[in-house]
């Protein structure tokens, strides 16, 4: 981690929380208690999990690996992993690329 980043990040946390006015910077450890006000977890959407399961079903039915599908779509394999896990809310253009790479219908990807 860059030293400049730590300093800048610490100043933002202090500004947001209004705490730690006169604090020696080198003694700080960034704990979850300090960053608790900054980090927020995203709500899980069940629609993404259903969509991911549909993508996985169609991919396996066509005997494609995640890597091969990523290559056909021209995306990173990690993107395919996140889609199938239901952790990534993707753009419509990405869905269209996915549909073209899998060669499946719109209904096959969107059904519940």
Image: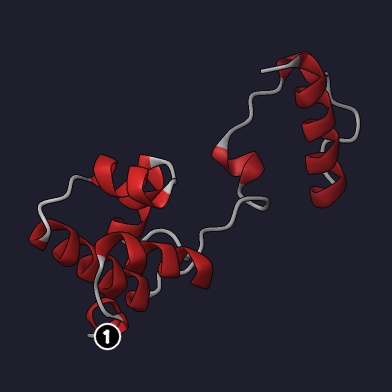
Closer to the camera in the image, 62 or 52? 62
The image shows residue 32 at horizontal and vertical percentages of 56, 40
Total residue callouts? 1
Q: Is residue 8 above or below residue 24?
A: below
The image shows residue 61 at horizontal and vertical percentages of 9, 62
Q: Quadrant of the N terminus?
A: top right
Left or right: residue 27 versus residue 42 is right
Q: Quadrant of the C terminus?
A: bottom left
Q: In the figure, residue 11 lies in which quadrant?
A: top right
In this view, the residue farthest toward the right is 22
The image shows residue 53 at horizontal and vertical percentages of 21, 67
Residue at 51% x, 58% y: name it: 41
Within 10 Å of disc 1 (Cα), the crowding (few <14, some 14-19, many 20+) is few
Residue at 29% x, 57% y: name it: 85
Pointer 1 residue? 107
The secondary structure type at the circle numbered 1 is helix
Closer to the camera in the image, 35 or 107? 107
Left or right: residue 81 versus residue 22 is left
Residue at 47% x, 65% y: name it: 89
Closer to the camera in the image, 46 or 23? 46
The image shows residue 56 at horizontal and vertical percentages of 20, 61
């Amino acid at each position: 981690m860059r030293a400049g980043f730590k300093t800048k990040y610490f100043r933002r946390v202090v500004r947001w929380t209004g705490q730690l006015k006169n604090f020696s910077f080198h003694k700080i450890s960034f704990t979850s208690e300090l960053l608790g006000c900054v980090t927020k977890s995203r709500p899980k959407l069940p629609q993404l999990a259903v969509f991911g399961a549909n993508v996985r079903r169609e991919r396996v039915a066509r005997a494609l690996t995640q890597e091969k599908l990523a290559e056909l779509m021209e995306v990173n394999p990690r993107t395919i992993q996140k889609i199938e896990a239901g952790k990534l809310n993707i753009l419509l253009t990405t869905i269209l690329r996915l549909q073209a790479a899998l060669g499946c219908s719109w209904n096959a990807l969107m059904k519940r």
